[in-house]
Image (cartoon, rainbow, N blue to C red):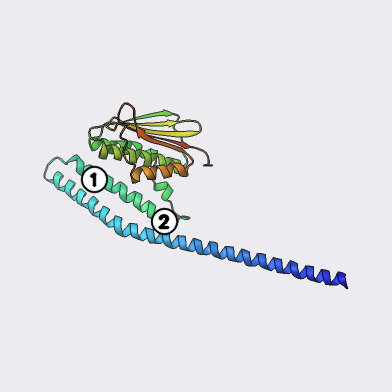
Amino acid sequence: MAAGVTATVTRHRQAYLEEAEQRAAEAERTREEAALRRAGEERLRIARELHDSLTHSISIITVQAGVAVHLARSHGEDVPPALLVIQEAGGDAMRELRATLEVLRDPDHSDGDAQASGLDRLDDLVERARSTGLPATVTISGIRRELPTEVDRAAYRIVQEALTNVSRHADGAAAAVRIDYADEELVVQVDDDGKVHPDAPPVPGTGLLGMRERVAALGGRLRTEPRSEGGFTVRAELPLGEPS
């Protein structure tokens, strides 16, 4: 009788534990589904906000610049280089914004990665900076090869942000862009010969913070600081393997 009672209690206890485990698993699954649903709703909300706040404004800027270029040419006048820069930059901004919106709306079935800018557009980026009056040089060392998508995109954004900062904050400075394809990492460095002094470093803005976040997400290292000889340097070392 004692053995029978013990076996019955054991079976009931085992059944109770299995039921508890099933309830816990179901609760965890429900939480994950709710979190995914909230994340999806938030992505859609951000996509709508970006579309409503940026797409219309960028479109107007691009169209107006195009109209101004057309009128200048139709009257036989020289087109101001600034207008051409605005027209080209507006087109690029619209293309990248559309790619970003596609990723936000449907990250699993979007070709946004294929449309995102990478180092294949480095020459266009540097040429656009030159057209604004910024003297810029490019030096590439190592064997150029296909990069992981996130590394390629981060490298482009780092150069873009660094050149933008030179144009905005270092009047009359020249920029030198260096890309080094090493065996295990990609090194991106942008130096300028502006007037920043080591004893008075600039306060990091949103651009530098975003740059640091990109590099950290890839498991890389970022150095942004004044140069001893004057000017500022941005150096990012991006691993080509999986981030730790």
Q: Element under label 1?
A: helix
Q: CA distance from mark 1 to mark 2?
A: 26 Å
Q: Residue at x 23, y 51 (%)?
A: 61
Q: Residue furthest right?
A: 1
> Measured along the vertical axis of the image, is residue 64 above or below residue 146?
below
Q: Which label is found at residue 104? A: 2
Say whether residue 11 is left or right of residue 206.
Answer: right
x and y, in percent, of residue 70 in the image: 17, 47
* Nearer-the-camera pick, 123 or 230: 230
Residue named by callout 1: 86
Q: Which label is found at residue 63? A: none
Image-quadrant location for residue 12:
bottom right
Q: Element under label 2?
A: helix
Question: From where the camera sits, is residue 181 visible?
Answer: yes
The amino acid on which the numbered mark 1 sits, given as a three-letter code, is: Ile
Say whether residue 204 is left or right of residue 113.
Answer: left
